Image: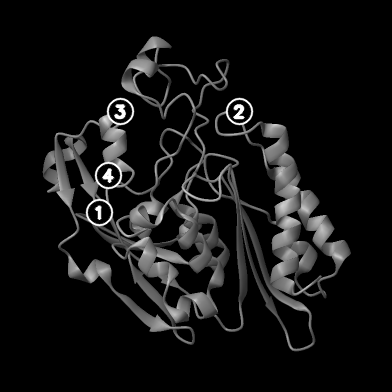
Amino acid sequence: MLSERGAEAMIVAGGTDLFPNMKRRQFEPKSLVSLRAIAELQRVTGDADSGLTIGAGVTLAQVSRPPVIAQSYPALARAAGDVSTSQLRNTGTIGGNLCLDTRCNYYNQTYHWRKSIGFCMKKDGDICLVAPGGSRCWAASSSDTAPVMIALGASVRLIGPRGERVIPVDELYRDDGKDHLTKAADEILTEILIPPANGLRSVYLKLRRRGSFDFPILGVAVALRLAGDGACAYAKVVLGAVGSRPVVVPQAESILIGNRITPESVESVAQAAARLAKPMDNTDSVLSYRKKMAHVFTARALKEAAGLP
């Protein structure tokens, strides 16, 4: 159906992002293809020892509650539970959150508001109003679960008319606010594949103006695995909402792996995260504050995951 209708069709699962965007004329499909009746997309299988397979149609509420996720992948349970409100978590899906549209103060407005300022590059205009002298859209990634999935080393299965492919979640995203997904328009994200926990420690911290409902203006996902001698065997730090795609902090691996985690190494990684965080003035709060909080939240998350005071 998607292939037949081309650009005129869009997928709908929970619709918690799609429908508001349609009301604001940011999305203007002539056809909607619903996935809600596909039972195979609404299953969670596996366990912490063999790894989890989560159907893309599983709701965020369902992801946040199971003991196997809360105990073995706590960052994922926390991230899913932090999305919006309980009503929307009961409808919104994990696949939808991974594919969530990028956000910007100039884009996420009513049609008449956007028309009054001449529209923006992301929809109906030619200029990014965040950086008018540039040639790209700077709308920010706003998914809570994407940084966590990348930190956990998860993959996604995409199925379309040309067959299926499995790619790391990190490869699902482009650093482009307008065209932020590598998923083709006629491909469906069907499931998320999470590797065995194997002693993994994970934490997700979210910064937003209010304690609920709001999109992140910063998300920090941390995943660590410690060897028997206390040295770090696996480390991944990923920032969300500070760019058009989740930002991996590669220095976390080079600094932490093979060594014991200390307050000094935590500080080094936090400084590296702050350097990589390049938020724009296109979401809530000022960019200088958000950049500073990238340092603070990375340090907090690392200490919590490592069990440091």
Circle 2 Cα neighbour tier, 10 Å, few/some/many (<14 / 14–19 / ≥20): some
The three-letter amino acid code for the residue at tag 2 is Asp
Query: Is residue 63 shown above or below 68?
Result: above
The percent coordinates of residue 258 (x first, y second) are 78, 75
Is 145 displayed left or right of 241 in the figure?
Answer: left
- Find residue 13 and name its label: 1
Q: Residue at x 73, y 60 (%)?
A: 300
Query: Spatial distance from mark 1 to mark 2, Cα to Cα?
Result: 31 Å
Question: If you read the primary sequence from the N terminus, does the residue marked by circle 3 or circle 1 appear first?
Answer: 1
Query: Spatial distance from mark 3 to mark 4, Cα to Cα?
Result: 21 Å
The three-letter amino acid code for the residue at tag 3 is Arg
Q: Nearer the viewer, residue 167 or 274?
A: 274
Disc 1 element: loop
Q: Which residue is mark 4?
A: 185
Residue 20 in view here: yes
Q: Which residue is mark 2?
A: 281
Residue 192 in view here: no
The percent coordinates of residue 148 (x first, y second) are 54, 61
Disc 2 element: loop
Image quadrant where one finds the C terminus: bottom right
Question: If you read the primary sequence from the N terminus, does the residue marked by circle 1 or circle 2 appear first?
Answer: 1
Query: Spatial distance from mark 4 to mark 2, Cα to Cα?
Result: 29 Å
Q: Which residue is mark 3?
A: 24
The three-letter amino acid code for the residue at tag 1 is Ala
Question: If you read the primary sequence from the N terminus, does the residue marked by circle 3 or circle 2 appear first?
Answer: 3
Disc 3 element: loop
Contact flag, marks 4 and 2 (Cβ < 8 Å): no
Q: Residue furthest right?
A: 264
